[in-house]
Amino acid sequence: MPSLSTQEFVSSHQKELTHIATAARVLGMDAVLKAKSGHVGLPLGGADMGTLLYFGVMNHVPSQPLWPDRDRFVLSAGHGSMLQYALLHLAGYALPKEDIVNFRQLGSATPGHPEFGHTPGVEVTTGPLGQGIANAVGMALAERMLAERLNCEKFKVVDHDTYVILGDGCMMEGVSGEACSVAGHLKLGRLVALYDANNITIDGTIDISFGEDVAKRYEAYGWNVLHADGNDFASLAKALDTARASAQASVEKPGSTGPTLIVCRGIAGKGSPKWEGKPKIHGNPMSAEDVVDAKIHLGVEDVTPFSIPAAGVEAARTLMESRTQKFAAWQKTVEAAKAHWKTASPEKLAFFEEAIEGKSTGRPAIPNEAWAAAKGKMATRVASGRALSAAAKLNALLVGGSADLAGSNNTTLEGTSFVNAKAFGGRNIHFGVREHGMGAIVNGIALHGGLRPYCATFAVFSDYMRPPVRLASLMKIPSLFIFTHDSYAVGEDGPTHQPVEHAAALRAIPDLNVFRPADGLETFAAWQTALEDTHTPTAFLLTRQDLPDLDEVLGEGTPPRTRDTVLDGMRQGGYLLKDFGNPAAALRVCLVASGSEVALSLRTARELEAGSFQTLSGETVRMAVRVVSAPAPQLLAKNPVTLNTLLPADLPLIAVEAGSPQGWGEIVGRKGAIYAMKGFGASAPASKLDAHFGFVPEALATFVKNFLSVR
């Protein structure tokens, strides 16, 4: 933290801060005007908050945007992106003026909402309101978990805060409440959120839809709540000093104090004499005349578009000079710590090098000897638990938990504790019944870096956390989402808990690996594939019910699958499980299935190949059936060579899945058929539902024969 208090800093640099805030407002107005779209209310109204954070509070180095111990900043109100872009440009990040001029244009580094990995200095993709503050909770949690595992009295190599600017929309979205409840429960004191309470939304003033006492709600969550004038540096500084003191107290005595919310009463569009404080300023560009009027009102002499006031540029450069000193001091601490750990704690050194420095270990994702546990009859949720446990013994970065379903999801890691408000050294997390917040928190942990997070719930509740799953895919971060109880085989709980359309919905998300394994070996392969991929999130769809080992279903005389064969199949989306029997058969058909329906397809193939059939012309024929396991059909569809090799387009193709038929058309084509669910589930024992919905060999065989027009 800076040696001066924030109040002392403001007292010494009030003029410089004002110049920077004015420059940020100018850039915000000009960029939105040129783009003819965007939100200018926050860049104007939030300029004072953002300026004080970037130039007076946060430890960050523009030349080192990925410095592991930087303070994190999240603009949860991502519609006000020009505020962040202006601050990044003025601070000296690799964001040239040309990108500011090309705000919201194709190919620029300044998209309409901040995007992680696209713009230097942007920590997270925000825009869907509430997600950013929830991600920030994950970042603050990651900092505490890493700090407890690495820091000691002599060496503090993980020692930073997480700051957020959020608005009324974020406060209204339910995900923020879920995540902030977790933050308060865990007393994440190093999380500081500035709430831009400007009383404005798109439709009008806030009171038309939002009348609750936010301060009392957050106090009930366990947060410290402060108040400040969002457009006054001195008022903001006083609140931030209190927040930072609280953050330090939470480090010295874990559990003593929670995160801080600063309710910043401010004016949307501050600086525009015509529009400040009015709803229209929230999401509409100002006219060219209004922009000129605002610049004159702010004391800007050169009103030419994108002419940045020189005083603001110079002030920003001067105030950022001291930031490099913080980075240099951290580097020296790290060098001393690593030298000490080399002999005193080699395990801690290895963890630091992997978690903080990103050093590759070269070890397998799952120990070779652990794969024996993948064989035999079991539910794939059980196999997943075994794979996760085995991987966690080698991979100290794996952390996570469940939405109050850990025992059912098989996600609790043995040999380590659950984190709590007073101890963050464990690797298990109780998320509570908060799927939406859980997914966003996990994304925040992944974005922070240093840990590989997972979370779990029932597949039917993937609906509740679809936004963070989608955003993980958009950001290309390797979050792990475990969804168990993947079909009507949930049984007696009935259709409310039986997913039907969920596999198709998840597969529809671009850049998301969705694996629905058919047995233990495929489940282990899915986990290894997921852990090897550091730029793609993964969703696992796993069964509640036991599934047979596919090698046992194939029976004697068939060579057992190898680990490499199944791994290759997982990576490309599918593999050949059983080739055509009856070489001389006149009728050939290919069945392709995922998950629990793969064994069904094998049994149906055996039944079909054992019989003989009459065609419509009266000819008696034999049948040959190929079975392809497709644990990730969306990947198979992306590999046309593999797809056509496994499932030749000139042969009858039938897809089999106890779920929605959507998506399988890409695999079987217009001439193929899909054997799937036609509606929702029902409440009954799973064994009864198999026959009721027709997922038994006799029913599937009849469907195949009808499709081929034989009897």
Image (cartoon, rainbow, N blue to C red):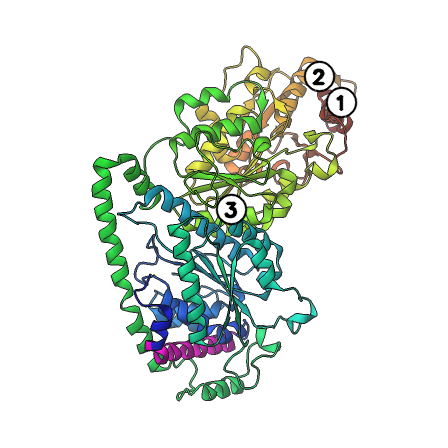
Against 145, residue 298 (above or below) is below
Question: Where does residue 208 sit, x and y in percent of width and height?
Answer: 69, 70
Mark sitting earlier along the chain (3/1): 3
- The secondary element bearing badge 3 is classed as loop
N-terminal of the two: label 2 or label 3? 3
Comparing marks 3 and 1, which lies closer to the viewer? 3
Q: Given the image, on which type of amino acid does mark 3 rest?
A: Asp
Q: Which residue is mark 2?
A: 621
Q: Is residue 184 above or below residue 499?
A: below
Tell us which disc is closer to us: 2 or 3.
Answer: 3
- Within 10 Å of the Cα at label 2, are there few (<14), some (14-19), or many (20+) other Cα atoms? some
The reply to whether the magenta stretch includes residue 28 is yes
Could you tell me which quadrant the C terminus lies in? top right
Magenta: predominant secondary structure element?
A: helix
- Assess whether mark 3 and mark 2 are in contact (beta carbons under 8 angstroms): no
Residue type at mark 1: give it. Val
* Residue 109 visible, this angle: no
Looking at the image, do the residues carrying marks 1 and 2 touch, with CB atoms under 8 Å apart? yes
Question: Is 34 in front, or is 114?
Answer: 114
Badge 1 local density, few (<14 within 10 Å), some, or many (20+)? some
Q: Which mark is residue 511?
A: 3
Q: Is residue 415 above or below residue 49?
A: above
List the residue tagged with mark 1.
710
SS type, badge 1: loop
